[in-house]
Amino acid sequence: MPAEAASRRRAQWSWALYDWANSAFATTVMAGFFPVFFKSYWATGMSATESTVRLGTANAIASLLVVLLAPVLGVIADRSGRKKRLLLLMTTLGVLMTGGLFLVAEGYWLVAAGLYVFGVLGFAGGNVTYDAMLLDVADRPELERVSALGYALGYLGGGLLFAVNVLMVLFPDAFGLTGKAEAVRVAFLMVALWWALFTLPVLLFVEEAPHRPALAVGAGMRQAWREFNETWSLLRGLRMAFLFLIAYWCYIDGVDTIVRMAVDYGLSLGFAADGLLAALLVTQVVGFPAALLFGRIGERIGAKRAIWLALSGYVIVVFWAWQMTASWEFYALAVVIGLVQGGIQSMSRALFGRLIPVEHAGRLFGLYNMMGKFAAVIGPLLVGWVALLSGSARHGILSVLLLFLVGAWLLGKVRVAEGEREARAMEG
């Protein structure tokens, strides 16, 4: 029994290390350096408006591909019976595209944008199978703790590498680099190597449970589109899971809107860019212990109440940002966001895992990830139109509150015990 427990714990830590691995892409590439480097290096010579349009188009294409493919990848994960192979495939795509950014010369914006689009696809596609594998390494009583462990290691790993990358850009001479441009390019290469290295544990030490007769990956892909509609039909028997997905769509839209709009909002208030970058690091540092803490809180009070707790934190963030005047307040908000962001993400994943049958985890987590990628669609539009009609960016930020309130109201209608019974009944 001790050997079995040790093996299970090793599998859980190996699974969680994938979050440590791919969070470097989310932090250093997506949130940190790619947007700035695209405008200043690859799109050099363009007007600010033109480069913004091209960067926005690249992000839109990446998001659209993810939305279209996430449910299909989930079906393939279920029907092929080989989640780890699919994880390896998507990770390899992301690693190669990220490493390829190191080779892109100045001015080649189209090549950089293409690599970025497929890098995002590899990142998001890997997350579909990674999330589904949560049910392979954790029993239902362990879901909150193990899910939180993944997000905590993601904040820690992504934050550590990002901190090193920021130091490289600020002090390139100390690292033997010729300048900031080379430092950023080397940072992209480091992310690729980091991502590849720390993916090895999940491939070596996690054993996925075969829930259905395995098909060849090619055969699974041919059936994927035919079975996509069946996935939506599946949700008819999982009413609480479906209701939770709608609630999740609303409040995670608010979460992602704050993540995407925070830097622009800070700049509009006249805060320095270096300070905003430092605030991003603060969020990563605080997010590590906070995600672990939320795992313990979720075990004690349940994932649903833990999500409500995190939503309360976001309500405070929105009201505070609405009347913020001093730069120190942006750092304080970064701390608050760090306290609740990992918690709301990890508890949402854990709660959804409770509401679905294990044998359909891949396809249903595909829908879960699709809903997440649809997020930050309504929010930015809401912020933009409210700001335009009111003439105040502050009122635009305040409008995000609506997403959190609607999400919290819908979450209140999710009856977890009933949802767990529905999931067990479908497992037979």
Image: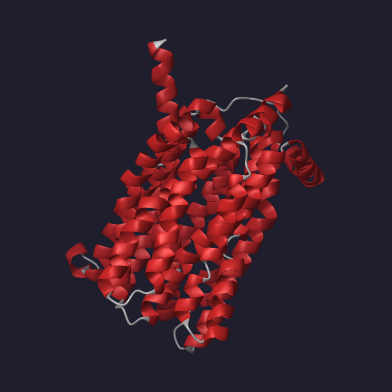
Toward the viewer: 27 or 313? Answer: 313
Horizontal side of residue 403 vs 157, given as left or right: right
Toward the viewer: 202 or 371? Answer: 371
Place residue 338 in its image quadrant.
Answer: bottom left
Horizontal side of residue 401 vs 237, given as left or right: left
- Residue found 58% across the figure and 54% down from its top: 407
Compared with residue 246, is residue 364 higher up or lower down, i.e. above or below?
A: above
Toward the viewer: 356 or 402? Answer: 402
Place residue 250 in its image quadrant.
Answer: bottom right
Residue 131 percent across, percent down from the top left: 55, 41
Horizontal side of residue 23 vs 92, given as left or right: left
- Residue found 52% across the figure and 41% down from its top: 304
Q: Quadrant of the C terminus?
A: top right
Compared with residue 401, is residue 218 higher up or lower down, i.e. above or below?
A: above
Residue 315 percent across, percent down from the top left: 45, 60
- Residue found 55% across the figure and 29% down from its top: 136
Residue 64 percent across, percent down from the top left: 65, 63
- Residue found 34% across the figure and 57% down from its top: 336
Compared with residue 215, is residue 195 higher up or lower down, i.e. above or below?
A: below
